[in-house]
Amino acid sequence: MAGSVHAHADNALERYLAEVSRSSKNAVFAEGTRYRDPIAIREDTALVPASTLKVLTAYLAIKRWGLRHRFTTEFYLADNTLWIKGLGDPYLTSEELDIIATQLRKRHPLAIKAIAADNTYFPDIQLDGQGDSDNPYDAINAALSLNFNSLKFKRNNGKIVSAEPQTPTTTTTRTVGSNYRLTNGKSVRISLPGDRDSAARYFAEVLAQKLTNQPVPVKVASVPPGARLIYRHRNSHTLEEVLVGMLKYSNNFIANQLFLMMGHNGRTRQVSLEAAQQYVQTQSEITFGWPSLAIFEGAGLSRQNRLSAQQLIDILEVFRPWRHLLPAHNGKVRAKTGTLSGVRTYAGYYQDQDAQWRSFALLLNKPITYRFRYRFAESLAH
């Protein structure tokens, strides 16, 4: 019986490999086992990696900061105005604002007359592949933003209100929500429209409501000279936890926050796309010996991004100590998917018959059934 099961699995794998072979826009590289030689089809062909690129982003983030790193946000006081200095923390959620509000009340129990948000650490950036839709995966990146720069609201008895109990309804919620026709009780999550100022203003509005029961004016401006630092918040989530969320939910916002920040050297006031791209190029050359690299952002949104199956295997080899960060599938596969229109990719590790984790990378840059990549990985693991 066992022999017939293995024969069936081998036959299935052969069928999948035949399908990969049919197009010059497909490639695969899979590490061999004691029972099977390595599999290589167009392994050196550079193709669109889609979100499998996030494995490289995750590796470079670990190398840059370490798994125990916690991102920070600074709070200053001047003339009873609370100033928020955004420093790109990718995991500022409504729940994190509850922690921040508690700490601020301890440090400054007196009335705050206004709240100002400083978002100058990031310029206005439109990344290649980042659309202008209201889908959360198109959320823009900013130095100060809440809930991955998204907004969830619903219509309740004819009024627009927050659809999350942990997130109060604000002016932005009502203004943005009024543009949507929703049936009573129905909710929707969208990327916050507007630019970096919109993101910072919404953050300040939500914090104002969590911090005080009184109406508080909100503005976007730079922290003035002489403002006193009263609290530096270190996020309750470590980089390891941030990466788990990024990889599990394929969160483009987190990936590109990390991508943009990792290139900042501290000698300039702002992050820059050019510095981030150069950092990734330099680190990839140091780590992998790649002389050139076509990477335009860190989430896999851009169709100009290019990686080969061999390069993905190179990444997976150095990422092996952290394979537990990747999403699990059927107990024997840990891997990251990538999906764009006409693109299906999958890269990670499969467990062989000796319970050893082997790396694989599948790049399909032509339309194919959605579950093909999962069935392919399962056939490797048999």
Image (cartoon, grey):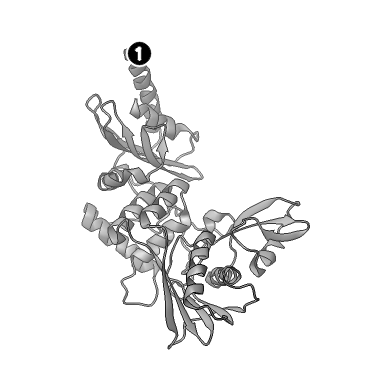
Residue that label 1 marks? 4
The residue located at (51%, 73%) in the rendering is 105
Query: Nearest the camera: 356 or 156?
Result: 156
Q: Quadrant of residue 255?
A: bottom left
Q: Quadrant of residue 210?
A: bottom right
The residue located at (34%, 43%) in the rendering is 324
Query: Nearest the camera: 349 or 152?
Result: 152
Locate the C terminus and report the quarter of the image it occupies: top left
The residue located at (50%, 68%) in the rendering is 102
The residue located at (52%, 70%) in the rendering is 196
Given the current orientation, which residue lies at the most extreme top position? Answer: 1
Query: Nearest the camera: 153 or 51?
Result: 153
Locate the N terminus and report the quarter of the image it occupies: top left
Relative to 373, is 199 above or below? Answer: below
Q: Quadrant of residue 61?
A: bottom left
Other residues around mark 1 within 10 Å, as few (<14) / some (14–19) / many (≥20): few
Residue 54 seen in the figure? yes
**Amino acid type, mark 1:** Ser
Q: Position of residue 117 (x, y in %)?
A: 52, 76
Q: Position of residue 293 (x, y in %)?
A: 31, 56
Query: Nearest the camera: 137 or 106?
Result: 106
Secondary structure beneath label 1: helix
Q: Position of residue 278 (x, y in %)?
A: 31, 64
Residue 311 seen in the figure? no
Q: Report the number of discs.
A: 1
Would residue 84 appear left or right of 179 to someone viewing this image?
A: left
Relative to 84, is 237 above or below? Answer: above
